[in-house]
Image: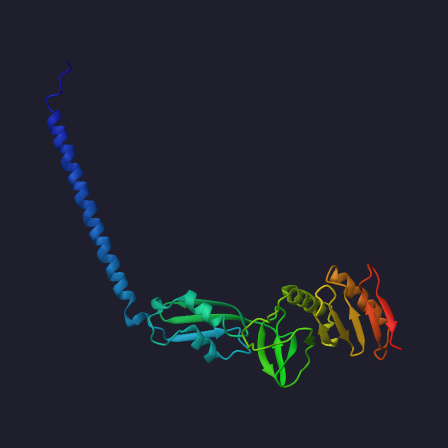
Amino acid sequence: MKKQPKNSGKIIDINRREIRKRKKRAARNRFICFLAVIAVITFMMTPVFNIKWIDVTGNEKTKFGEIVKASGVDYEQNIFRLNIKKSKAQVKKIAYIDEVSIARHLPGGVMIKVTERVPVACIKYANGYMLIDKTGRLLETVKEQLNFPEIVGIKLAKQKAGETLKTTDEQRIVAMGELLDTLKEHELLERTSLINIKNADNVTFIIDGNKTVKTGGNYRLDYKLKMLEATVSELSRSEAGVIDLSVEGQALFTPEE
């Protein structure tokens, strides 16, 4: 039988003492860290970190006060109590607001950056018109059509600014958005006075006040509008009629009788 070294008991005792020391040091370090965290949290809650300034950028249509009120950010509010996620969601409810970011600037500042929606068309509403963006978001009511094409083929009922144009056929809204985007790219939007989205597979619109354009659907829409531009360039502004883009590779003009 193998004999244990005479000093083995001492080695075990030394190891145990070392383990106890390490446990005590670890407990002391945890306690110190705990006190440090409490001290930091307490400091963070002091008036040093109360909100002293609020800045808003990117807004043209929306007033500073409306954005700040919607965000729920208050002067002298502790900056760390600010719920940024909730504030962003509230600001995005404003009709003209598309995107929003909110950032803390220590010790006492809040920066709110917004991107606003752009009105590109209008739809009849009550005794005036409702401006809408390319996604069908309702932006604001105006008395006159201004310089925006009027959307027809869909009724606006019991809706208000900030909501999205409702329809049982979402494809009509998609087709409208694609057409508005492409018309803008080709600088034809300002020449467009009316867009009929009743049939999503054949949206029609009027340019120059007297030329009805049949798209035949949004397939290869960019190419179709290039053909439209070429055709219109050969016509005078006074020539009225129908331009049919539904035939592949052609733009057929039929003069008004």
**Residue extending farthest front:** 168
Give residue 127's position: percent from left, percent from top.
Answer: 62, 86
Could you say which quadrant of the image residue 11 lies in? top left
Give residue 124's position: percent from left, percent from top.
Answer: 65, 80
Which sits in the foreground, 207 or 79? 207
Which sits in the foreground, 25 or 87? 87
Tell me which residue sits at (67%, 68%) in the image.
176
User: For the C terminus, which image quadrant?
Assistant: bottom right
In the picture provided, is 223 more to the left or to the right than 253? left
Which sits in the foreground, 73 or 120? 120
Could you say which quadrant of the image residue 181 lies in? bottom right
Tally the numbered discs.
0
In the displayed structure, 19 sits above or below 215; it is: above
Give residue 40's position: percent from left, percent from top.
Answer: 27, 61
Tell me which residue sits at (73%, 71%) in the image.
187
> How has the structure been colored for display?
rainbow
**Residue extending farthest top:** 1
Tell me which residue sits at (28%, 68%) in the image.
45
Tell me which residue sits at (47%, 76%) in the image.
67
In the displayed structure, 27 sits above or below 160; it is: above
Which sits in the foreground, 63 or 10? 63
In the picture provided, is 60 more to the left or to the right than 181? left
Could you say which quadrant of the image residue 41 lies in? bottom left
In the picture provided, is 169 more to the left or to the right than 24? right
User: For the N terminus, which image quadrant?
Assistant: top left
